[in-house]
Image (cartoon, rainbow, N blue to C red):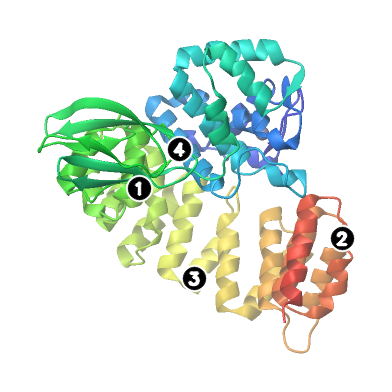
Amino acid sequence: MFGGMENASCTTQTIGALTPPNARPDEADDGLNAHELAHQWFGDLITTTKWDHIWVNEGWATFMPHFWTRLKLGEDAFHISRFGTYQGAYFSALSNPMVRSDYNVPMEMFDGNAYPGGATRMFMLMHMVGEETFWKACQKYLQKHGYKNLDTNDFFQTWGQNTNRNLEGFKKQWFYTKGAPKVSVKKVENGFEVIQETEGFTIPLEYVKISTSGVTSKGKMDLEPKKAQIIATESAETILLDPGAWLMAAVAFPSYTDQEWQLAWNAAENAAGKMRILQSIGDKPKLVQTLFKTEKSDHVRNQMISYLQDTDMLIEISKSPNRTEAFTATQNLYRPKNEKVGARMKEIFETTKDESLKETAYSNLLAAKDDEATANLGWNTSTYSLRTKTAALNWYASKDASKARSMALEAVYKFAPGPVRMTAISVLGRVKDAEGSREVFNLLVKLAKGRPYAPMSAAIEALATYGDKAAIPVIESRKNHSLHFGRNTVESALARLNRP
Ligand SMILES: [Zn+2]
């Protein structure tokens, strides 16, 4: 059910950890392998005392794989993946503080705080104390607490000693305070006014001043809640806050001109800084296009592709020898449903040896063509993840209920491979029975009573979609399922069926 489980000295992983033949290098499951491997130290050698502090395990196992990425793919890839982790952390921080004890079941703690939240805070700690000091402190930490349990307080006591710093404030605001800082900037008479709109955080804010010749100076300020501060600039200067994107915060930039955005782009300290700018200029596809043309980093360019809207340009990129770029461009051609896109998707579908590229091209082809011939083509094609078959089945479910019903029934009766069978079960809930028949309903009930988890859970969801209250007693009989996920499925299905 999870990607992996870090049993000491013998990690187990699900079938999802395997990739198809001819997979792109970026498709590999290194991240998961590195996560479970990191757990041998962070989680197994040192373990949390209570679920309240589960970040001690999961945050670290999420933090460490980024350094594998840096070793394998370089600085840009490292900063881009780090920024992705920051994003997850920011949104999770809005719902709960990192450390809490008000959960109903331990599983609730395995959330965006534990994983990206813990990792992000370790990046902030690393940035604050410096990387060299950080790893030395880490070594001492493992030596002192190895084969023992520890909580958040023990963690900061040790790390405070190991880095020669008082980390009480850091601990309090990043681990026991709900929320995340939000910074906004506006142009004023002699510079820029910066204000932190949130309570509870004092943040070390780095910034650079920029002119057309590049960065003119760097600065740093402690930004307290609700207290505006001015960064004075010369008339030709503009600013970029947190240019390396090391701070977990939302930064609302002023309304820059395209030229000012370009200056900011060039002043970003690393690829994470560029990712934050990219978010703010996402609604300016022309500007992104201009920056794309001169951007030298493959990794950064790959991230920009999702923001491009020019169909011809995307089709061109879909032919790039850089397989990751070509794949991202193909993925983003799902929007324009026209002849040109259809023809390119067909070409990729027919010629590529990359299984996931083939599946992606097919799903865009089906969307562009929207006809039975294309649906049949997918149904009769076998790919690694069987996504052309499931896409075809879903297409029929929305176009021709009777055909979809007979395809889905056959898939279940003949025990089609997992992904097809699970999609078939869900499709049966959508298309329901033909007039006067109970075949679909009875089959779903039988599966819902069965032992294998995946079809059981898919059938319970399908019965909720089917919407016949006669399924309630059957679903209720699974209320005490041994798996937390099973009980959740039962609960939400019952809520849907009991709705008046
Ligand atoms: Zn883990």
Counting residues from the start of the chain, the first of labels 4 and 1 encountered is 4
The residue positioned farthest toward the bottom in the image shown? 436
Q: Which residue is mark 2?
A: 450
Q: Residue at x 59, y 35 (%)?
A: 175
Is 161 above or below relative to 120? above
Q: Which residue is mark 4?
A: 248
Identify the element where label 3 is drawn: helix
- Depth check: give the residue in front, 401 or 161: 161
Give the quarter of the image for residue 143.
top right
Counting residues from the start of the chain, the first of labels 3 and 4 encountered is 4
Q: Amino acid at mark 4?
A: Met
Rounded to the nearest whole Å, what is the CA distance between mark 1 and mark 2?
A: 47 Å
Quadrant for the N terminus in the image = top right
| Viewer-nearest of discs 1 and 2 | 1
The residue positioned farthest toward the left in the image shown? 235
Rounded to the nearest whole Å, what is the CA distance between mark 3 and mark 1?
A: 39 Å
